[in-house]
Amino acid sequence: SLSLEGMARYQIVPGRPRFDLQVAAKSYPLSRLLEYLDFHYPVEGRVNGAFPVSGSPEALTGGGPITLTDATVWGQGFTRVDARILFSPGHVALEDLRASVAGGGMIGGRGALSIRERTFEVKLAGDAIPLTAIAAIRTANTDVAGTLSFQFSGTGSVDHPDVEASAPRSEAS
């Protein structure tokens, strides 16, 4: 379910927010929220959280803690993702990200997206992720074993990103 409590103006008043709301989601489909915000990214799951937002659709501010369960992000499964979402005009950010990979291991970090410019910044670190839990590896070769720990950072355009990754050797076979 999704609930909104607060004030929304039908008439635009210069210098005053069009809405000032408390958003509460309980097991709400993320795909519906992304569609409403006109975000077209391959991310699915169920959202839980409550936080304030104010401003207008073009200049949204606010945020707070959220949890995403039974998630799939770019084809990778996660049992749970916890983060603090922050909205500022033209930007959305995830801070204090902690994600439990479906099949084992954890990923932590932060990221931000400049919506209109379609630019981003991300820093992630993963630890003790079984290679068999990584969707891309699992579909390419099922005879892989071991764990993965990594550091990943990226910036730039969503369409032409600059990324850097490092992964120390693990017990892989």
Image (cartoon, helix red, strand yellow):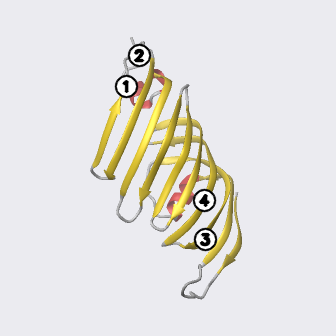
Residue 94: x and y in percent read: 52, 50
Residue 48: x and y in percent read: 67, 50
> Which disc is residue 54 wearing?
3
Element type at mark 3: strand
Tell whether label 2 touches label 1 (CB within 8 Å): yes
Element type at mark 2: loop
In the picture of the structure, the residue carrying the numbered disc 4 is 63
Gap between marks 3 and 2 measured at Cα: 46 Å
What kind of residue is marked 3? Ser
In the picture of the structure, the residue carrying the numbered disc 1 is 167
What kind of residue is marked 1? Ala
> Horizontal placement of 19 versus 38: left or right?
right
In primary-sequence order, the first of circles 2 and 4 is: 4
Gap between marks 3 and 4 measured at Cα: 9 Å
What kind of residue is marked 4? Gly
In primary-sequence order, the first of circles 3 and 2 is: 3
Tell whether label 2 touches label 3 (CB within 8 Å): no
Residue at the spot 60% in from the left edge and 59% down from the top edge: 63
Gap between marks 1 and 2 measured at Cα: 8 Å
Instruction: Work out whether 13 lies above or below 142.
Output: below
What kind of residue is marked 2? Ser
Element type at mark 1: loop
Gap between marks 2 and 4 measured at Cα: 38 Å
Foreground residue among 172 and 71: 172
**Quadrant in the rendering for residue 9:** bottom right
In primary-sequence order, the first of circles 3 and 1 is: 3
In primary-sequence order, the first of circles 3 and 4 is: 3
In the picture of the structure, the residue carrying the numbered disc 2 is 170
